[in-house]
Amino acid sequence: MKIMWGITGAGHLLKESINVLNKLSKKHEITIIFSNAGLEVVKLYGYYKKIEKIIKQNPNNRLILEDDQKYSYPLSGKLTHQKYDLIIISPTTANTTAKIVHGIADTLITNVVAQSGKGQIPLIIVPVDQKQGLIKTTLPPRIDKDICKRCKMCMAKQICPTKAFNPPEIDTSKCIRCMECEGCCMHNAIISNEIMELYIRKIDADNTKKLEEIENITTLFHPEEILNDERIN
Ligand SMILES: Cc1cc2nc3c(=O)[nH]c(=O)nc-3n(C[C@H](O)[C@H](O)[C@H](O)COP(=O)(O)O)c2cc1C
């Protein structure tokens, strides 16, 4: 099966999405597309190396970035004759969901969504803003600048296998989130798995409900649910 997987700029459900993407890539040919924010957020969380690994699993796998495309998003026009069997967007930000339900196509991902409808290719969307109210989400790893003492002999810097650790910053383009650094700082300046409470607005939850009104879209509420889809097995 030929699957296109889109990643937008949401930290929520990002790790879970990449885990499922990794599982699917063992059995299927995968094209990964990013929104610009998606690429940035994946790097911030230190997951970019995982994406590269998935791409290398099959010579037919492809990675397409928003900046590789011109304003009319030629890739989305080619969708139908490149014969994708399924398109998945997970995680899908409140921003992209809002654009989809209002028929806006002005990014690579929203163009692919619009074109998938025109080409009648099944589309699964996993929106992150689901129900109005508070949710808990995990933040990217960081160094607390107030706690970091800029030690001359920084153990965390020494142990980092990708040289991403440059106190008081972590270079997110190099960090592979191995978390070898965790516990190395005697001042406990490395903050990982930091949980933040966020309020999901009514407008964003309402937009998620409206996804169900769009013909070719199936809305799922957790990436793991994709694995139950009979088209995939
Ligand atoms: C670290 C980080 C995490 C984010 N997580 C979310 C999120 O969980 N949900 C969301 O709707 N937006 C989130 N955003 C904001 C989006 O990235 C931002 O609205 C962006 O413009 C969305 O663009 P896109 O929909 O084209 O990907 C996050 C931003 C950052 C920097």
Image (cartoon, helix red, strand yellow):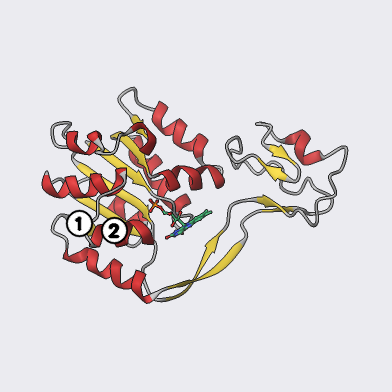
The one nearer the camera, 227 or 194, is 194
Residue named by callout 1: 217
The numbered mark at residue 74 is none
Residue 133 appears at what percent x and percent y? 44, 77
Quarter-wise, where is residue 28 in the image? Answer: top left
At label 2, the amino acid type is Lys
Q: Residue at x 36, y 38 (%)?
A: 66
Looking at the image, residue 160 lies above or below residue 136:
above
Q: Is residue 164 left or right of residue 56?
A: right
The one nearer the camera, 3 or 43, is 43
Q: Residue at x 13, y 32 (%)?
A: 81
The numbered mark at residue 99 is 2
Q: Quadrant of the N terminus?
A: top left
Residue 40 appears at what percent x and percent y? 49, 44
Does any atom of ligand 1 lie closer than 8 Å to the CB of label 2? yes
Looking at the image, can residue 49 be seen?
yes
**Element on which disc 1 rests:** strand
